[in-house]
Image: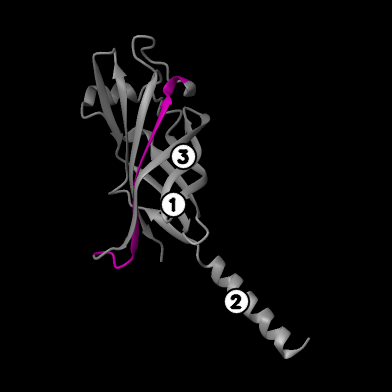
Amino acid sequence: MTFKHLMIAVLAAAGAGSAMAATDTYNLDPTHTFPSFEADHMGMSVWRGKFNKTKGTVTLDRAAKTGSLDLVIDADSIDFGLDAMNTHAKKADMFNVEKFPAITYKSKSFKFNGDQLVEVDGELTLLGVTKPVKLNVSKFKCIMHPRYKREVCGADASAEFKRSDFGLNYGMPAFSPEVKLAIQVEAIKAD
């Protein structure tokens, strides 16, 4: 092998190493990540609720336009803003939090439009049932956070699905099965 070939191999290896280093990992900020939802209440009104405890990670390679999302929601943290409703929602006929303490979302792929993340294809697991759910991302931005002194990325995502697809059939047919999901998420770059 000539010196020239050796240098080309070293530079190629260095380039491959830096391409691998382009994937960054972010930890979800539980104080800025709150999945919320809207569901029908007998056609008269829309009930809104959120989950107060989440954790997870995001990986992001902006150059390759790839990434992953792994979100874990504490089902027991459901909050309608009404204690009686929270208590009922945790029971076996709704979220059955004793048997299914976690709701998860795991991405399969990210879709970008230029530098903007616009869509996440993934799977939602609720009540032990896993189904595909696509998240539409309306906002996506990363900044050097002035307080954390690290990069923080945030997004606002939404989806629609039928709760009955996951076996959450409470109140049907008087209550419509359609659910609107919104996830505000912020994640801090790992050290």
Q: Quadrant of the N terminus?
A: bottom right
The segment highlighted magenta reads: 147-164
- Main SS of residues in magenta: strand
Tell me the SS state at disc 1.
Answer: strand
Spatial separation of the CA atoms under disc 1 and disc 2? 27 Å
Image coords of residue 113 (percent x, y)? 44, 50
At x 40%, y 20%, the residue is: 92
Mark 2 touching mark 3, by CB under 8 A?
no
Look at mark 2 in the image and give the residue it sits on: 14
Mark 3 touching mark 1, by CB under 8 A?
no
Residue density around tag 2, few if under 14, some if 14–19, many if 20 or more, within 10 Å: few
Magenta stretch: includes residue 56: no
The relative height of residue 178 versus residue 116 in the rendered view (above or below) is: above
Tell me the SS state at disc 2.
Answer: helix
Farthest front residue?
114
Mark sitting on residue 156: none
Look at mark 1 in the image and give the residue it sits on: 57
Mark before the other along the chain sequence, 2 or 3? 2
Q: Nearer the viewer, mark 1 or mark 2?
A: 2
Magenta stretch: includes residue 150: yes
The relative height of residue 151 versus residue 117 in the rendered view (above or below) is: below
The relative height of residue 132 versus residue 17 in the rendered view (above or below) is: above
Q: What residue type is labelled 3?
A: Tyr
Spatial separation of the CA atoms under disc 3 and disc 1? 11 Å
Image coords of residue 14 (percent x, y)? 60, 76
Mark before the other along the chain sequence, 3 or 1? 1
Look at mark 3 in the image and give the residue it sits on: 105
